Image (cartoon, rainbow, N blue to C red):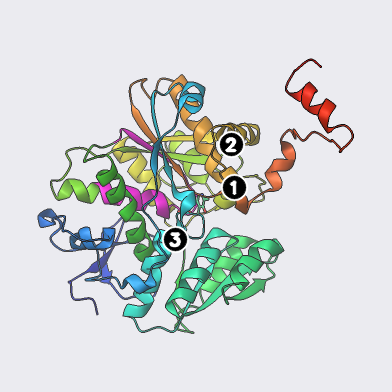
Amino acid sequence: MSEKRVKLQSTLSGREFPFDIIEEFTADGESLEVVVPEITGAKIRSGRFLWERFADFLPFSSVDSGLSLGEGNTPLLEAGKLLESYTGIRHLLLKNETVNPTWSFKDRGSLFCVRMAKEMKEKITATISTGNMGNSLAAYGARAGLNVLVFVPAFTPSEKILAMNVHGATVIKVDAPDYSLMKNKILGLAKEFSLRIVSGNGPIRVEGYKLTAFEMFEQLNGRVPDFIAVPTSACGHIRGIFKGYRELREAGLIERIPKMIIVQAANNSPVVSAIKQGKNHIIPFSNFKTVAEAITGGNPAGGDEIVQKAHRYGWLAEDVTEEEIIESHQIFARAGFFVEPATATSLWAVKKLRDQGKITPDATVVLMLTGSGLKDMDILRTQPQSTVESSLSTIHADLHRILNRNN
Ligand SMILES: *Cc1c(COP(=O)(O)O)cnc(C)c1O
């Protein structure tokens, strides 16, 4: 067991559980979070890796760097003129998680999931995923010498499956009438098979995402942004970033915590709809279609925690239409950033919130660039092509025309 006296606590009712239980949620559906003792006395240490410098905040006494694929250390950049004028936000920053080893922020959580498997001396680890999560866990499993099982729904495109297979993961394609039904059935088998099935919102994964907050704290020299916009599905990412800032405040390292902005596609907005309607529970969505494939959790386990945190901490929530996602994707690309459609949602969302006056003009806003555009090229078919057809006999004349030069 871990040398620290770490435990898990349910996030709504505060019930306590042992750190090493295999389930990621309570039987009645609450998310669990890691409680590390004595956070109030936590200090930043020296060390080459984030997990060394912030070891006092983490459930593990150490992390073997041999498990890492070099995740994190991602750039925090000024968004630049085009995106600033598009959104009307002068202090707009981009946290570019697309440069992680498998091109999404999931890698930060996968490192901690394989670290946990090692702690528990497990030889095999599993997840249910249609994309980035399966890809990331497959890569980290390969690095750690673990067998990885990925359960995918039957509709998963073959390129996505290939990206998991290439690392040696066993992909199990499950025919089921509905993705949520499939998830529940498989999660129900975990105990019988002693199989730790990690989800996008598990307590250990969230500890990995917490490091993103610590990294931004260092990058901004201890300053705290006013808002952080996060495209949200399973809710693990947003909860990890927030937990990181909350713990920095508990440790007395910062005085205030940023407000989170929850962003979802209008066609699938179980969390955002609940917040806008003043409800305390998510509103499940099913049978929807959206180009934002990486954020298609229609009934996220533990989502109520995020709804209730939004009310309690005054977070913002906004949804965006398919047209808005496609336009944002294009604007990001024009600014030099090739992101997933799911990632693009945040641009229009903050633009709307700025137009409504919910974000003031002088606020500092961070957009989390969650995943790379290379993962999902279908959307490009909706965008204008600018290829010029030429040949050896016409190239001279063509260049004259393109460069607008007279003969
Ligand atoms: C997983 C993912 C999200 C959503 O994160 P959650 O932790 O599931 O809320 C957003 N964007 C991309 C690219 C993702 O892969």
Rendered residue at 36%/84% (across/down): 121
Judged from the image, the secondary structure of the residue bearing numbered disc 1 is: helix
Q: Where is residue 374 in the image (x, y as percent from the top left)?
A: 61, 51
Residues shaded magenta: 225-245
| Secondary structure category for the residue under label 2 | helix
Image position of 146 with respect to 221: above or below: below
Mark 1 and mark 3 in contact? Answer it, CB < 8 Å. no
The residue under label 3 is which amino acid type?
Answer: Asp
Assess disc 2: are there few (<14), some (14-19) or many (≥20) residues with their C-alpha within 10 Å of its C-alpha. Answer: some
Q: Which percent across, then down, holds residue 181?
A: 60, 65
Where residue 124 appears, x then y in whole percent? 47, 81
Q: Which one is in front, 406 or 72? A: 406
Q: Is residue 123 above or below residue 43?
A: below
Read off the residue under disc 3.
107
Magenta residue check for 226: yes
Which disc number belongs to residue 191?
none
Residue 152 visible in this rendered orientation of the protein = yes
